[in-house]
């Protein structure tokens, strides 16, 4: 089955959006920046589905891995992936995949968008925080305080915005005129 060019371009655009959103950041003293990267991860999973949402984030991570400065603070390279925040970057892949799977499960339910994004975020938090703990030797409570609790209000706002954007784009798609094929 061929993949439409529109889908591939959409995945590339969402990878680029992740790179841009990752630069809109507030650096924090312990190295985990507060940025808008997860907003684009939410959009990728919900708009592109599991496969292409994952691929869009894989493109983003691979670009950063080869040295393109797409990660927060215009960083790139394997050092960024193997450093304390590397687990969150890899968590983007899992989050987009899970969001896409969950949205596909009950697409007609409005509550499914924010719930799927919250589940994706939880997976990203779990993977990233575990990675952070292993690399820094930080205990669970301290890691949760540094890597999760401070970010919850902002991530809740990003989930709300992403849910509204996805719902609006879905409504636009439904309103597009259909082209009827004339009867022969």
Image (cartoon, rainbow, N blue to C red):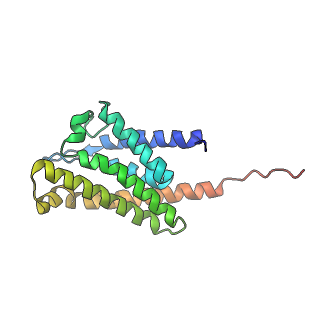
Q: Nearer the viewer, residue 181 or 137?
A: 137
The reply to whether residue 128 is in sight is yes
Q: Is residue 181 above or below residue 110?
A: above
Q: Is residue 35 visible?
A: no
5 relative to 176, above or below? above
User: How many numbered circles does the render carry?
Assistant: 0
Q: Nearer the viewer, residue 79 or 43?
A: 79
Give the residue at the far right of this rendering: 184
Foreground residue among 116 and 52: 52
Residue lying farthest top? 67
- Residue 41 at x, y percent in the picture: 39, 50
Compared with 137, 18 (above or below) is above
Percent x, y of residue 37: 33, 47
The x and y percentages for residue 166 are 49, 56
Query: Residue, x 56% and y 57% (percent of image)?
Result: 170
Q: Position of residue 174 (x, y in %)?
A: 63, 58
- Residue drawn at the location 27% of the way across and 34% of the way down: 74
Q: Is residue 32 left or right of residue 107?
A: left
Query: Which quarter of the rendered picture does the N terminus lie within?
Result: top right
* Horizontal side, residue 176 vs residue 162: left or right: right
71 versus 124 height, above or below: above
Q: Residue at x 65, y 57 (%)?
A: 175
| Residue at 51 percent of width and 69 percent of height | 109
State the image quarter where residue 3 is shown. Answer: top right
Q: Is residue 47 left or right of residue 116?
A: right
Considering every residue shown, the one lying at the far front of the view is 1
Where, by quadrant of the figure, is residue 156 drawn? bottom left
Picture quarter containing residue 127?
A: bottom left
């Amino acid at each position: 089955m061929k993949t439409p060019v529109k889908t591939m371009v959409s995945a590339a655009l969402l990878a680029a959006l992740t790179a841009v959103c990752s630069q809109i950041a507030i650096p924090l003293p312990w190295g985990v920046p507060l940025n808008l990267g997860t907003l684009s991860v939410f959009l990728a999973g919900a708009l592109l589905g599991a496969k292409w949402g994952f691929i869009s984030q894989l493109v983003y991570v691979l670009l950063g891995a080869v040295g393109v400065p797409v990660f927060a603070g215009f960083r790139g390279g394997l050092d960024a992936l193997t450093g304390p925040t590397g687990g969150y970057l890899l968590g983007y892949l899992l989050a987009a995949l899970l969001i896409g799977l969950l949205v596909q499960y009950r697409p007609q339910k409005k509550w499914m968008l924010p719930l799927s994004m919250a589940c994706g975020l939880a997976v990203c938090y779990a993977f990233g925080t575990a990675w952070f703990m292993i690399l820094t030797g930080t205990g669970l409570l301290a890691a949760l305080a540094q890597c999760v609790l401070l970010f919850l209000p902002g991530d809740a706002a990003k989930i709300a915005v992403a849910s509204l954007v996805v719902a609006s784009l879905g409504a636009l798609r439904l309103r597009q005129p259909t082209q009827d094929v004339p009867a022969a």
